[in-house]
Amino acid sequence: MLNQFSRTELLIGKEALDILKKAHIAVFGIGGVGGYVVEALVRSGVQHLDLIDNDTVSITNINRQIIASHSSLGKFKVDVMKERILDINPEAQVNTFKCFYLPETKDQFDFTQYNYVVDAIDTVTGKIQLISQAKESHCKIISSMGAGNKLDPTKFEIADISETSVCPLARVMRQECKKRGLTDVKVVYSKEKALTPLDNNQEEKVPGSTAFVPSVAGLIIASEIVKDLTQEAMLKARGN
């Protein structure tokens, strides 16, 4: 019988789809990157999600964040994302945390319950702590590097943090991971050199961004998670 995941099942098989339905994934940061990660995972069949973000939707989010619209302004991003998830799949189980993840808040989260963690936050301190906590719990994690001040979505690559180049955030993360002995850290990063925002007089030195760069980073992350979780089942379904 046809259902909303029939087209996905045609490619990955029933066993792989069942794996996705049972997977429990935490997404830290529901912004330009993280929102698209969640969107793609839910449309791929993932039903158990924890959403972590303490921010609300602002007018400057509308140009690039999938949850941002005039009707969602001022609402918590995790609440808007949860409503969207349940509209896509009413059977989904979604936990929301209005929390800014840092070493001081890490104890709110038990990573042993997760099959995968997505780091889509901005602070280096938080990103390093996420990676450390995931490693301690033997939980898979993928981390997003810088997507701001860039225009070319084709420059994104998946790599170990030790193999990254060009991206300033990746450089800092590479150094911090090396200091702490953190290895085998999967990241999505761009080899495009960051542009300088045209308005250099802005009081807050916020990066410029577009609809098509962070969204592509998020979709790449989601596809990598699906691949990592279901690769064996997909190969089996295809007789390999």
Image: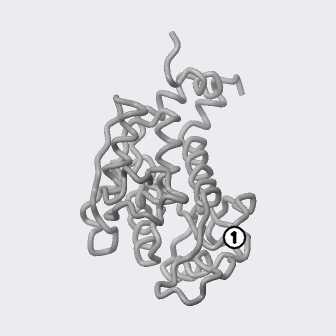
Mark count: 1
Q: Is residue 96 left or right of residue 38?
A: left
**Residue sitting at x 43%, y 33%:** 88
Q: Where is residue 100 in the image (x, y as percent from the top left)?
A: 32, 68
Query: Would you call the spot at circle 1 few (<14 residues within 10 Å), some (14-19), or many (20 or more)?
Result: few
Q: In this view, does 29 lie to the left or right of 229?
A: left
In this rendered view, identify the residue nearer to me: 15 or 147: 147
Q: Where is residue 139 in the image (x, y as percent from the top left)?
A: 43, 54
In this rendered view, identify the residue nearer to me: 211 or 37: 211
Secondary structure type for disc 1: helix
Q: Position of residue 148 (x, y in %)?
A: 59, 71
Residue underneath mark 1: 163
Q: Position of residue 34 (x, y in %)?
A: 48, 56
Q: Is residue 151 above or below residue 51?
A: below
Locate residue 93: give its quadrant: top left
Amino acid bearing label 1: Glu
**Residue sitting at x 68%, y 67%:** 190
Q: Is residue 239 above or below residue 79?
A: above
Q: In this view, does 159 lie above or below 103?
A: above
Q: Which quadrant: the C terminus?
A: top right
Q: In the current view of this chain or complex, which residue is farthest to the front? A: 70
Q: In the current view of this chain or complex, which residue is farthest to the left? A: 108
